Amino acid sequence: MAIKQISVFLENKKGRLLAVTRLLAENKINLRALSVADTTDFGILRMIVNDTSRAYEILKNAGFTLKITEVIGVDTTDEPGALNEVLEVLEKGSINIEYIYAFCTAQSGHALNVIRVDKMDAVNDILEQNGIKTLAPDEIV
């Protein structure tokens, strides 16, 4: 199942990330997952929030450059080799990974992996056929 992710392009300057999180907090939008990749001049903040459409409008109206992309959420156990199993399945299915970020929840004993792939239309079937659980947007917690 596809999950909507917001990518925000940020100048690599003090306070830019804070400006995004402040706007989200002021508008009661909850961050579910995030990743920041940076270069010398700019960064890309990738995030999943509880209200994608509203967050997009708020950030767009504040002058941020952003886009919405689809990613897949994959649930794995929090143990050695669990992510490797997913990656092996994707490799066998000729699915290329563009990027990935992950986090663990100590209470559940699971790792939640957010993955952007080149073949979003095929990835769900490949994972399902191999018994790998994908996550709905509200399951990213």
Image (spheres, rainbow, N blue to C red):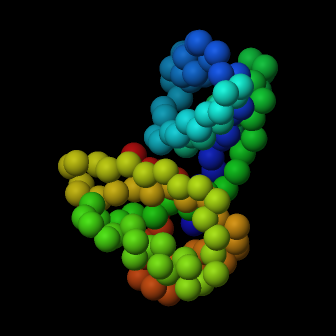
57 vs 37, nearest the viewer: 37
Is residue 52 shown left or right of residue 63?
left
Q: Give x and y (percent) for residue 46.
A: 60, 40
Q: Is residue 73 visible?
A: yes
Q: Residue at x 24, y 55 (%)?
A: 108
Q: Residue at x 56, y 36 (%)?
A: 36
Q: Considering only vertical position in the picture, is 43 above or below 86?
A: above
- 30 shown above or below 93: above
Residue 128 in picture, x, y percent from top left: 49, 81
Q: Is residue 112 left or right of residue 118?
A: left
Q: Is residue 19 visible?
A: no
Which residue is at the front of the view, 54 or 21?
21
Pick out the residue farthest to the front.
Answer: 40
Q: Position of residue 64 (x, y in %)?
A: 75, 24
Residue 47 drawn at (x, y percent):
57, 40
The N terminus sits in image quarter: bottom right
Q: Quadrant of residue 68?
A: top right
